Image: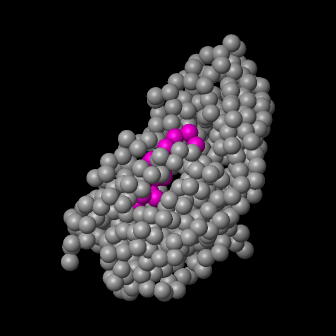
Amino acid sequence: MTDWIGDVFTSDAGWSHLEDLVDVGNRMAGSEGEREAAELTRDALERAGARNARLETFDIQGWTRGDSTVRASEDALDCIALPRSPDDAATAELVDLGYGLPADFEDADLEGKVVMVRSDIPDYYERYIHRREKYYHAVEHGAAAFVYRNHVEGCLPPTGSVGTQADPIGEIPAVGVSSEVGTRLARRYDGEEVAVRVDADVHDAESQNVHAELGPDTDERVLVTSHVDAHDIAEGAMDNGAGTAMVVELATALAAREDELDTRVEFVAYGAEEVGLVGSSYHAERAAHDSIKAIVNNDGVVRGRTLSLTTHGFDGLAAAAETVAERFGYPIETIPQLGPHSDHWPFTQWGVPGYHVMSTSDEVGRGWGHTFADTFDKLEKRDLLEQAFLLTELVVVLAGDERTVEPREPKAIAADLEEQDLAEGMRITGDWPYDFD
């Protein structure tokens, strides 16, 4: 029967929920808006037909931005603080480190300097370097402050957190500046004294995860996940309102196919993802990993038309995606490498089969994401519904008795991180979880 496909393509559940999320306003981790968005998501999952829709709260390190500044000579330049930057200031010589590749830090004298790096990498470089990796290279080499320069034009300073799980507040003040401000700084003030000031309120706060369920009451389960929080400077439509809207759409479609599920499907919309995967880490510490058959983590969907699934070396995940793509004649890109930067990772680092579900893009980095331009108008309802019907089938396939995706040994995951040159960055950011004898 394919009537369910028509139901998906005529559904308003996910798109309406996306509108509700962007209209909340500030969904920063620990804020009242994040709590409101979680409650809206709980209620939407309940309306979709999922059972036991609930919130699970946990404590987090709260952080609220104030006004931040970069001053150079007589210039007062626009900037925004990077979340979890300390409330602090530094005045020192500016060093423009370009892309901020690991070798760039090794070759420069950064002690007591203000370091500026770009948010992208050169075409020839073999891997993406995360913002936090660049920040902690700067810290390790004695920098006094960190300036993160967007590579996307349009007067858009980028945001994104610093800090580690052990020390949630970073060690040196950190700001984001637009491509245009970064160009001005590099052109006029490289080697000159600049002043960086971050004003921020650091406080205790609370976040929450949203949980709901469909299917038989089995111990084994498939997790369908997203994160509900967003950076406070924008609507957070792409990152990650669209992912949470997808979870609601999938719950709506799967409720109509519940008798086809051989395994419980648990929907989880995590809190506090943008400040270090806090909600998913809280869940992973308390969940029985051997009960999780697979994770379908939606973070970056709908931004383009074609689904892109990072499969983390799990052959069974790639095979399931290929089955769905062939069944419907739709392209689905699968990427076998590891991707340690979203809510699947607190589970997948220990060998739990997990997808990071995104959509294809030719851009380096987040594009409009993490800027003022992450707004509702950038997304298309058609893309949400096309991807939803494919992901609905994928979840049904994964939840079937005949489909088993073998877990991986943590040592094999660690070896892949080394081989793919990801281990160095994880160690410097405090994210390396392994202590093998």
Residue 158 image offset from top left, x and y in percent: 56, 37
Apparent side of residue 84 relative to residue 294 in the rendered image (left or right): right
**Residue 183, placed above or below residue 24:** above
Looking at the image, can residue 132 be seen? no
Magenta region, main secondary structure: helix
Report the front residue among 356 and 136: 356
Looking at the image, can residue 408 be seen? yes
**Total labels drawn:** 0
**Residue 205, placed above or below residue 122:** below
Q: Quadrant of residue 317?
A: bottom left
Q: Report the residue at 56% width, 82% height from top.
A: 290
Magenta-tinted stretch: 231-246
Q: Report the residue at 34% width, 55% height from top.
A: 384
Q: Report the residue at 69% width, 43% height from top.
A: 64
Residue 175 image offset from top left, x and y in percent: 65, 34
245 falls in the magenta region: yes
| The C terminus sits in image quarter | bottom right
Apparent side of residue 432 relative to residue 299 in the rendered image (left or right): right
Q: How is the image coloured?
A: one colour
**Residue 432, placed above or below residue 314:** above
Residue 285 image offset from top left, x and y in percent: 66, 72
Residue 18 image offset from top left, x and y in percent: 42, 53
Q: Report the residue at 52% width, 76% height from top.
A: 52
Report the front residue among 159 and 13: 13
| The N terminus sits in image quarter | bottom left
User: Given the current orientation, which residue lies at the most extreme top position?
Assistant: 74
